[in-house]
């Protein structure tokens, strides 16, 4: 029986298929979903699980970001705690000793792009769209996006994506190194995820785990960047601009920012 509310899970041949299941909100990561993902990743340490494939319910969205509707009454302390919680979860995923593949079936925005970037490999359908649109809300990425995007695509591309909030296609994401592969259909997405995972699982598990550890070790010195991100995310959370940005999203209108 599935014990999660916002996740669907299926264990097939030692691969745990996880589907984020809030299609009514384009699979946005609310606080409960973050909690469930944290619990799931702990449980995935079990020996019966050799690898994880993460995807989103439906064909429209992988994850369309953090749940903006939970943002309206965020205090500075709550924003800091939220950012640290998300950062911790995504770091656990990034450092997970078994392969984690993001099968990106649609929008991967904000926290969705950050979640995909925390996974070891990203495969996307051609309809997928990527971006860090937080500036549209008057805030910054808070789940490691300012760090991992720069790591994956370089500082220049990361600056442009984060400062403009622009969305890019799967093809453009592939060109800048944000995704590993782009496929045409949802079926191909599942097939390639399965094939890639099976290939990795046919290798020495200790060598796979140590490869992940070794690659990630080279980025450990950037811990200060994550701390700065959480503090700056929290600093944005109490601005009038952020309240305006979140309200404008809910009211489906353009925000009017004042720089305060
Ligand atoms: N948080 C909460 N709800 C969200 C959401 C999010 N990040 N993204 C989408 N939704 C909800 C919408 O509010 C809408 O709910 P409603 O039917 O109750 O109005 C539903 O999901 C469908 O989204 P909608 O905006 O109507 O779809 P669309 O096809 O017109 O636009 C997007 C799709 C992804 C471009 C648009 O939803 C969007 O910009 N989402 C926010 C992306 C974002 O800023 N993410 C970073 C957050 S920090």
Image (tube, grey):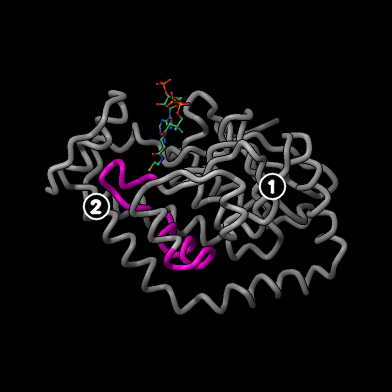
Considering depth in this image, is 162 or 121 the residue closer to the camera? Answer: 162
Tag count: 2
Question: Marks 2 and 1: which is nearer the front?
Answer: 1
Say if disc 2 is inside 8 Å of ligand 1.
no
Q: Is residue 249 shown left or right of residue 240?
A: right
Quadrant of res 58: top right
Quadrant of res 208: bottom right
Residue span colored magenta: 133-156
Say if disc 1 is inside 8 Å of ligand 1.
no
Quarter of the rendered image showing ligand 1: top left
- For the point 43% across and 67% down, the residue is 155
Crowd around label 1: few <14 · some 14–19 · many ≥20 (10 Å):
many
* Membership of 149 in magenta stretch: yes
Q: Is residue 235 shown left or right of residue 179?
A: left
Q: Main secondary structure of the magenta part?
A: helix
- For the point 33% across and 35% down, the residue is 70
- For the point 46% across and 43% down, the residue is 167
The residue tagged 2 is 77
174 w.r.t. 17: above or below = below
Considering depth in this image, is 137 or 9 the residue closer to the camera? Answer: 137
Quadrant of res 206: bottom right
The label on residue 182 is 1
């Amino acid at each position: 029986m599935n014990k999660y509310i916002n996740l669907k899970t299926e264990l097939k041949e030692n691969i745990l298929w996880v589907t984020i299941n809030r299609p009514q909100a384009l699979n946005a990561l609310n606080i409960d979903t973050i909690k469930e993902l944290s619990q799931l990743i702990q449980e995935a340490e079990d020996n019966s699980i050799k690898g994880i494939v993460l995807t989103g319910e439906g064909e429209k969205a992988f994850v369309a970001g953090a749940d903006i509707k939970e943002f309206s009454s965020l205090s500075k302390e709550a924003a800091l705690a939220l950012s640290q919680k998300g950062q911790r979860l995504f770091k656990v995923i990034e450092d997970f000793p078994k392969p984690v593949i993001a099968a990106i079936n649609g929008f991967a925005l904000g926290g969705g792009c950050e979640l995909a970037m925390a996974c070891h490999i990203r495969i996307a359908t051609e309809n997928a769209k990527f971006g860090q649109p937080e500036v549209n809300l008057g805030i910054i990425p808070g789940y490691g996006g300012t760090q991992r995007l720069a790591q994956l695509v370089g500082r220049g591309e990361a600056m442009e994506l984060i400062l403009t909030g622009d969305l890019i296609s799967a093809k453009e994401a592939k060109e800048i190194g944000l995704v590993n592969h782009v496929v045409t259909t949802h079926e191909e997405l599942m097939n390639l995820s399965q094939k890639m995972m099976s290939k990795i699982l046919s290798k020495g598990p200790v060598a796979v785990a140590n490869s992940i550890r070794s690659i990630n070790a080279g980025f450990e010195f950037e811990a200060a960047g994550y701390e700065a991100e959480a503090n700056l995310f929290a600093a944005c959370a109490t601005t009038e601009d952020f309240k305006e940005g979140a309200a404008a999203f809910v009211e489906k209108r353009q925000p009017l920012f004042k720089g305060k």
